Structures are given as C-alpha cells and as structure tokens.
C-alpha cells in the first residue's frame, strides 16, 4: 500500500507528455459539454446563435462568476464559503444606503468594497483562529449574520436611484459591442489564473489543500494564506455586488440569495475537488460559461426558474459524483 | 495511566455539565429579564405557545443532532419538509376522508425517500454532506414548486381532521408537544442505550477507527440521513397542519434555525460529541429567543442578525471551552 503510493508520486513527478492523458482531461469533457449546450440552445431558439446574443448573455451571469474565481482557491483548500451571497447583499445594501444618505457614489463604491473585504476577513480570521470549527459552520453563521445586518439596515425596503453613470457597470458596452462586465471579468480571470498557476502563492494554496500540517512544517504561513484567500472572496463578492446592483438598478436585502449554489456548482463542475488540493482555473472558467449559457438558454425558452434550480442542483451532485469516481479509479491504479 | 485517563474523562464530563448548567442558568436569567420587561412572558398561555411553536424545531433538531454527530450537515431539511408537506396536503385535498395517521405516514415516507437518497449520495458516492444537501435542497424545492404549480393548498381545502393533528390536545398538552416528547424519549434511549446509537458516536469520533473495528460506516451514515429525512417528512405534515397552508417556499431557511439550536445545545460540529439533554436546552433557549424578541418589541428585521450573532457566539464559546478542557487534560498528564 505504502510503496504503491510512493511510486505513484514518482510517476507523477516524472510523467512525460502523454497524448491519451492530455485528451482525457476533465477540461476537454467540459469543452464537449460547452459545445453540446450551445448546439442545444441554438436548436431551442433561432435567435441564440449570433455573436451579439452570445456576448450579451454574459451580462446575465458574469456577476456571480467573479466570486467563482476566489471560491476555486477556497475549495482547493478543502474549505467552503457559503456566506458569499450574503456578503453580496450586505455590501450592496450598504453602498445604496450610503449613497442615498448623501455620500458621493465613488466613495459609496469604495465603502462597498471595504465591507466585502471586512466580511471576508472576518470569515478568514474566525476559520484560522478557531480551527475546531470548520469553514462550513463559520460561513453558515456569517451567512445568517451578514444577511441579517442587511435586513437591519434596509428592513424590507429597496434602495436605488443611482446616478446615470453607475448603470454603465451592468449595462455598458465597450465599442458598442463588448459588454463592460466581460472585459473586467477577463482581466480578473487572467489575474486569478496567474495567481493560482504562476506564483508561489498559488503553489502554497495547492500545498495547503493537499496537506496543511505538512505545509505548516515546511514553512508555509498557512493561516496568512487562508486569511488572504477568504478576504479575496469577500472582495470579489463586493465587486459582484457592484455589477449586480447596477444591473438591477436598485437593491434589497434579499438580493443574491442562493448565489452560493451557483458559484459552488461552477467551481465544482470545473473539476475542483471538494476534498482539496486539486483543480485548475481553466476548468472553472469553462464551467462558468457552461452554467451561464445553460441558464441563459433555458431562460430563452421560458423554462421555469425552479426547473433551472433542479438542473443546477443535479449538475452539482453529478459533477462531484463523477469526479469522485475518477478519484477512486486513480487511487486504485 | 488508566487512572489518569478516567480522571480526564471525568474532568471533560464535568466541563460538559458545567456547560449545560451555565446554559440553563442563562435560560433562567433570560426568562427573568424578559418577564420583567413584559409580564405576559411567563403566563401559561404564552408558555403553551412557546412549547407548541418550538415542537417542530425540536423534532427536526433530533435528526440534525445525529447528522452533526457523524460530522455531517443537512441543509436540505427545510426543502424536504416543504416537499413532503406539499404532497401530503395535496393528497388531503384530493381525499379529505383519509385518516390523519395515514397522512402522517405518507409524509414520513416521502421524507424518508429524500433522506435515504442523500444518505446514499454521502455514503456511497462519498459526496461532502454540504454539497450533496445543497444540491438536493434545490432539487426538492424545485420539485415542490413543479408539483404544486406554484399554488398554495390553503386552509379551506383541508378537512378539520387534518388540521386537528396539530391543534388537538392529549392529556392537556398540545399534540405537537406530546409527539416531540415521545420522539425525545425514544431517541434518548436509542442514542444512549442501543448498539446502533453508540455506533453513531463512534463514527463521528473517528470514522477510520470505526471502520477498522468493524462498524458498517456506510450503513449507519445512510441510516442517519434517512432518520433525518423521515423526521423532516413528519415535520412537513405537522407544519402544514399547524399553519393550515402548504406553499412552495414553506420553511425556506428553516434548516439554519435547526442547526443553530443544535450548535447552541453543544453538539460539536467536529463530530462525535453532543447529548440529548444539551440539545434540549439548546432548543429551549432558541425557542425562547424567538418567542421573547417580539415580546420585547424587537423589530422582526433584527431577528436574523441576532440569530446569526448568537450562533457564532455559541460555536466560538464551545470551541474555547473545548480548548480549555484539552489544555487542562494535558497538564494533568504531565503531573
């Protein structure tokens, strides 16, 4: 058993380029699913398959996708953060209320980002300081707490009347063709891709996800790394809040409820293993667009949002199931 | 060595007792405080209200306690409750003459199916409980909406016999309370005095050792989620009968209340720990908070935030207590 594992690691280290391995990667499967979904959508609606629709569609799901980027880091740790939907609500509500109270909009946006950072930082500190508590229970309680605070602030009212230029975040185009949110998302995706795959920080994230005790003994500042990642999660939630609020035109305390499901589904379908240590940004990006276009296409043909919920829920479970099966077959090799 | 071990055990047991005692003390202080602010609080009618309103929560908390003891969590119970409540309400609407007991059995069966499915996903497909139940939560909700077409089953469509499930009395106690008491007695016996009950703790303490010592971990895990499911199904019928309406968003987010009550009651999220007596005081405190906040004229919009803060505080305090216990144990061993 033991020797087996050792040789397994050696093979991994010395592995040469293998054509079969290259084509049987999770990402290729995602590419196939992506193409199938697009073919399906174009069959469902004759208006679907043109570049303008495809570009426009991204506006409807990219706000969540911002959070999926750091969430991939969180899940690679083997942790989870289900408070992100509430963080979106809290930062959005604070921003709107401050603006309505007379604060200049740019300042309100900065405060919104700060709220997200603080919310994420609190999650991170609690998870690191109280190792007995899992991230499940910490973010579960902050999920209730953050949305609770949003309700305290705004009760069951809505707040809006933002300045005209604020609409640009959710509805603006660059050169009249490319949605502004897509451009910002691509930039964010590149940054997170580089962070995960090309920096020591990213290597540390994988190391912690594989074995946090071993990482600690090899000199990685586990606590610091975790706090940074959870803070990033909060920050990206606030950025998502800005885009979402702008698209909606106003905000309510129940905004972005259930976002955690979509976001976790995006990451997990992207091949990030919930047991930690495994997953790549390319898969996450692909699955963001798979789930996004799936939702958009189903919406085009008026499938009820509840049915979409069922589909996304089933997708989440099936993707974890398949990746678990793959894991089992790998370890039994 | 053996002596110091037993001493440690005694010590941690005492800490546990102190914890429960302080929880009880806090409940009493809270009761006195609320009573001083609003003299209706300790009246018989309000106490009846309090226990009746907490009954469903307490029934669900028993199942959740077992799930949490095995290191799991179940976010789908609110949706499972809604689904079984909706199906049984629709059956009642179609066949008003059915005996209430039969309807309760139908509800339990539907809940059981959902719970077993989750158990299979967690045990056989080794999906993390939080992921499996998050997914199933949405599937249950979606199905509830689909079968009901988004419409309610409302009070006038339900026969009196059905509504009397939760309004009737037995020996002067509301049926719901009687049911909760029976369930607690049965589960107290089950989890403390049967082999299977002890296995649940064994799995939570260390799944690996449990497996090595010959416990069928998968079977017990499936059982735990099935029990949770059947209790959700039962709660679904009770809920619909109590509020005399079944909606597709019934009990949305209720799972958080149940988890909160468990956590306050000292059920450790790390698994393997938690007692029925602790759970009962947690449920009581939680029910009291929900009853007392409106009586103190706290805005309903504050309730979520207070709830979140209380859970966070409870888990932090229990983590600190645990830390102190293990520290003391270390010192003992050095002696």
Image (cartoon, rainbow, N blue to C red):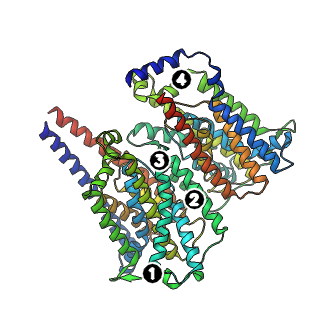
- Horizontal side of B325 relative to A227 (left or right) equals left
Q: CA distance from mark 3 to mark 1?
A: 37 Å
Please give the residue where the numbered disc 4 appears in the rendered image: A203
Same chain shared by disc 4 and disc 3? no
**Residue B49, horizontal then vertical, whole percent:** 41, 76
Q: Secondary structure at mark 4?
A: helix
Subunit ID for the residue under disc 1: B
**Residue B161, horizontal then vertical, whole percent:** 49, 84
Nearer to us: label 4 or label 3: 3
Q: Is residue A111 visible?
A: no
Q: Relative to A96, is B38 above or below?
A: below
Q: Evaluate if marks 4 and 2 touch, with contact meaning CB atoms under 8 Å apart.
A: no
Q: Quadrant of residue B143?
A: bottom right
Q: At x 55% / y 54%, what residue is drawn? A: B136
Disc ID at residue B140: 2
Q: Secondary structure at mark 3?
A: helix
Q: CA distance from mark 3 to mark 2?
A: 17 Å
Q: Secondary structure at mark 2?
A: helix
Q: At x 86% / y 48%, what residue is drawn? A: A47
């Amino acid at each position: 058993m033991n020797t087996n594992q050792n040789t397994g690691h050696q093979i991994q280290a010395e592995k040469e380029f293998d054509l079969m391995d290259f084509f049987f990667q999770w990402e290729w499967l995602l590419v196939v699913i992506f193409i199938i979904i697009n073919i399906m959508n174009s069959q469902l609606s004759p208006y679907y398959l043109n570049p303008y629709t495809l570009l426009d569609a991204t506006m409807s799901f990219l706000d969540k996708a911002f959070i999926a980027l750091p969430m991939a880091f969180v899940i690679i740790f083997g942790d989870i953060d289900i408070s992100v939907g509430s963080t979106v609500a809290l930062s959005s509500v604070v921003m709107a209320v401050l603006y309505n109270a007379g604060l200049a909009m740019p300042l309100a946006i900065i405060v919104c980002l700060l709220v997200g950072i603080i919310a994420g930082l609190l999650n991170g500190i609690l998870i690191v300081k109280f190792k007995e508590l899992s991230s499940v229970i910490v973010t579960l309680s902050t999920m209730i707490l953050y949305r609770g605070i949003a309700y305290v602030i705004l009760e069951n009212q809505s707040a809006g009347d933002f300045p005209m230029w604020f609409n640009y975040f959710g509805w603006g185009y660059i050169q009249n063709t490319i949605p502004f949110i897509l451009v910002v998302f691509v930039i964010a995706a590149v940054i997170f891709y580089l962070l995960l795959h090309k920096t020591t920080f990213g290597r540390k994230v994988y190391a912690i996800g594989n074995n946090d005790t071993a990482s600690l003994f090899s000199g990685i500042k586990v606590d610091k790394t975790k706090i940074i990642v959870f803070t990033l999660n909060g920050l990206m939630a606030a950025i998502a809040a800005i885009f979402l609020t702008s698209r909606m035109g106003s905000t309510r305390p129940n905004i972005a409820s259930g976002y955690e499901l979509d976001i976790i589904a995006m990451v997990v379908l992207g091949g990030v293993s919930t047991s930690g240590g495994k997953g790549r940004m390319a898969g996450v990006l692909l699955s963001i667009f798979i789930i996004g276009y799936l939702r958009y296409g189903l919406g085009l043909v008026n499938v009820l949002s509840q049915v979409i919920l069922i589909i996304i829920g089933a997708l989440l479970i099936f993707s974890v199931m398949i990746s678990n099966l793959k894991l089992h077959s790998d370890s039994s090799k | 060595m053996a002596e110091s071990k037993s001493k440690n055990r005694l010590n941690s047991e005492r800490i546990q007792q102190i914890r429960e005692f302080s929880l009880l003390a806090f409940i009493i202080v809270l009761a006195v405080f609320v009573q001083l602010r609003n003299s209706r609080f300790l009246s018989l009618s309000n106490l009846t209200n309090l226990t009746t309103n907490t009954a469903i929560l307490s029934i669900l908390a028993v199942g959740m306690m077992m799930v949490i003891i095995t290191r799991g969590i179940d976010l789908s119970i609110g949706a499972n409750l809604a689904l079984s409540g909706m199906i049984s309400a629709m059956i009642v609407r179609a066949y008003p003459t059915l005996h209430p007991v039969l309807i309760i059995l139908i509800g339990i069966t539907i809940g059981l199916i959902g719970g077993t499915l989750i158990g299979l996903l967690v045990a056989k497909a080794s999906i993390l409980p939080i992921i499996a139940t998050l997914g199933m939560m949405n599937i249950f909700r979606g199905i509830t909406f689909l079968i009901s077409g988004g419409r309610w089953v409302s009070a006038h469509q339900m026969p009196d016999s059905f509504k009397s499930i939760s309004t009737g009395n037995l020996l002067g106690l509301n049926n719901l309370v009687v049911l909760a008491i029976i369930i607690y007695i049965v589960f107290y016996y089950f989890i403390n005095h049967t082999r299977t009950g002890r296995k649940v703790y064994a799995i939570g303490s260390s799944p690996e050792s449990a497996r090595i010592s010959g416990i069928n971990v998968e079977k017990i895990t499936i059982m735990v989620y099935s029990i949770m499911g059947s209790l959700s199904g039962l709660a679904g019928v009770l809920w619909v009968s109590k509020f005399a309406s079944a909606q597709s968003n019934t009990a949305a987010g209720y799972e958080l209340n149940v988890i909160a009550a468990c956590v306050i009651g000292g059920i450790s999220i790390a698994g393997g720990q938690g007692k029925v007596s602790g759970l009962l005081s947690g449920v009581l405190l939680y029910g009291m908070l929900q009853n007392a906040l409106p009586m103190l004229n706290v805005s309903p919009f504050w309730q979520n935030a207070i709830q979140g803060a209380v859970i966070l505080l409870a888990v932090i305090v229990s983590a600190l207590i645990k830390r102190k216990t293990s520290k003391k144990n270390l010192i003992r061993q050095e002696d």
